[in-house]
Image (cartoon, helix red, strand yellow):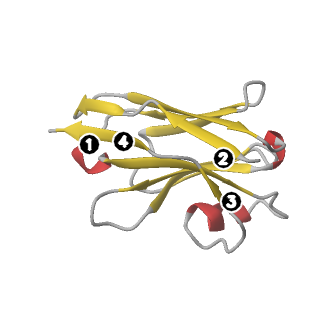
Amino acid sequence: EVQLQASGGGLVQAGGSLRLSCAASGFTFDDYAIGWFRQAPGKEREGVACIDTHYNMTYYSDSVKGRFTISSDNAKNTVYLQMNNLKPEDTAVYYCATAGPFPRPAYLTYYCTGHYSGLHSWGQGTLVTVSS
């Protein structure tokens, strides 16, 4: 059974940092992509950052590029999202999810931008609140 456990959310002031963790189990971690998605109240869910260690690829949305870093510790089956210079508009529930294996590297972009029609597995969310 695929399980994803997200943690690390909290309340932080604008300009601050947080690191989210996504601990995964129940599947061959190295073969699958892991993504961080977020949903703010009244807004659609958006892909924030995704990683596919099989292809050594990452993807970032324009809204977080240069501020967020996604990384993977395959020995621990854990993906991290380091979030720096946080802004109030980053306030959302953050979810980690997994999909794949992907047949080509380009699929990571499809996945992270919401254009992937394959199966996803989702973890529970963790709330990030950025105060101004």
Q: Disc 2 designates what residue?
A: 51
Image location (x, y in percent) of residue 126: 43, 41
Image quarter of residue 4 = top right
Earlier sequence position, callout 1 versus callout 3: 1
Q: Disc 3 designates what residue?
A: 108
- Rendered residue at 56%/69% (across/down): 114
Q: Are marks 1 and 3 in contact (CB under 8 Å)?
A: no
Closest to the observer, 11 or 102: 11
Earlier sequence position, callout 4 versus callout 2: 2
Q: Disc 1 designates what residue?
A: 87
- The amino acid pointed to by label 2 is Ile
Image location (x, y in percent) of residue 15: 25, 32
Earlier sequence position, callout 2 versus callout 1: 2
Q: Disc 4 designates what residue?
A: 127
- The amino acid pointed to by label 1 is Lys
Closest to the observer, 95 or 48: 95
Earlier sequence position, callout 1 versus callout 4: 1
Q: CA distance from mark 1 to mark 3?
A: 26 Å
- The amino acid pointed to by label 3 is Leu
Q: Are marks 2 and 3 in contact (CB under 8 Å)?
A: yes
Q: CA distance from mark 2 to mark 1?
A: 23 Å
**Which dot, 4 or 3, sits closer to the camera?**
4
**Which dot, 4 or 2, sits closer to the camera?**
4
Q: Is residue 97 left or right of residue 77?
A: left
Instruction: Indicate the secondary structure of the residue bearing disc 3.
Output: helix
Mark 4 crowdedness (10 Å alpha carbons): few <14, some 14-19, many ≥20: some
Q: CA distance from mark 2 to mark 3?
A: 7 Å
Image location (x, y in percent) of residue 72: 67, 33
Image location (x, y in percent) of residue 14: 22, 35
Earlier sequence position, callout 4 versus callout 3: 3
Give the total number of marks visible in the rendering: 4
